[in-house]
Image: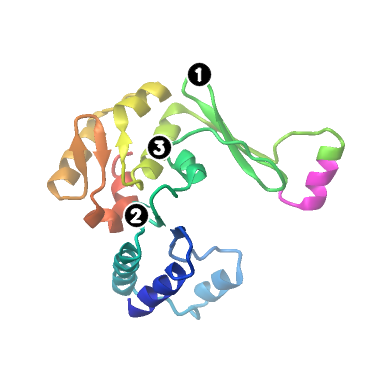
Amino acid sequence: AEQAANEARRVAELGVDHISAYQLTIEPNTKFGELDRAGKLPLLDDAILADSFVAVGATLQKYGFSRYEVSNYAKPGCVSKHNLGYWRGQDYLGLGCAAYGALSREDGTGWRYRNPPTPQRYAEMVTAGDLRAHELDELDGETRMRERLMLGLRLREGVDIHAAATELKVDAWPARRLAAVDDLVKRGRLRRDGEHLLIPPEAWLWADDTACRLF
């Protein structure tokens, strides 16, 4: 935790106005992934990671940063508009090699696409006027609702579940979700104000697990 706090302090003292602090994700098709499978990658235990998470937040707050998302901090007026659009479920256009984009339809469905991941293939297709996506995923309303909850609950502002469900043409309060919300509220993992849900800062360590329980 002390090392994490010191690193956060050094970055803050560089004069930046926005900081993203994510835990390293071990991807399978990487050198780290190979070492992890072989049991040769030294990883910190969950208790140390949790202490580091808290230490980074406390340190950056002293330097005038506000945590507006579980892993993102900004000084006043410096939040990332691009990131906010992504977390709020807005459409975004992916341009260039390997870029992702997501677009919605009026019926609440949508699709997400990825451009060719290799520069040579991307250049060949664009030169030939071939604008087909390398990958294309159709997203129904329920899938988009799950993503809206997963991403939106990472924000300090939370999610207006009624507004999201109306936009996506799905049921905002199926019985399973309503029961899960009641349980999470009782446990202090979630706050509900009418149709608005948010995760209190003291429960951000469990944000992903909390969102999954609402699916």
Mark toward the viewer: 2 or 3: 2
Label 1 crowding class (10 Å Cα cut-off): few <14, some 14-19, many 20+? few
Q: Which residues are magenta?
A: 117-125
| Residue 93 in view (yes/no) | yes
Tag 2 and tag 3, C-beta contact below 8 Å: no
Q: Residue 106, labelled with which disc?
A: 1
Disc nearer the start of the sequence (2/1): 2
Q: In terms of secondary structure, where does tag 3 sit?
A: helix
Measured in 3D between alpha carbons, the distance from the residue under mark 2 to the one under mark 1, in whole angstroms, is 33 Å
Instruction: Assign a secondary structure to mark 1.
Output: loop
Q: Give the amino acid type for the residue marked by disc 1 in the picture.
A: Glu
- Which image quarter holds the C terminus? top left
Cα–Cα span, label 3 and label 1 = 16 Å
Quadrant in the picture for residue 32? bottom right
Q: Residue at x 75, y 52 (%)?
A: 118
Image marks 2 and 1: residues in contact by CB distance under 8 Å: no
Q: Is residue 192 left or right of residue 36?
A: left
User: Which residue shows up at 31% across the image and 62% down it?
Assistant: 61
Towards the viewer: 182 or 199: 199
Q: Mark 2 = which residue?
A: 67
Q: Position of residue 86 (x, y in %)?
A: 48, 41
Q: How is the image coloured?
A: rainbow
Location of mark 3 (residue): 148
> Which x, y percent locates residue 165?
35, 26
Residue 19 position within the rendered picture, expressed as x and y whole percent measured from the top left: 45, 60
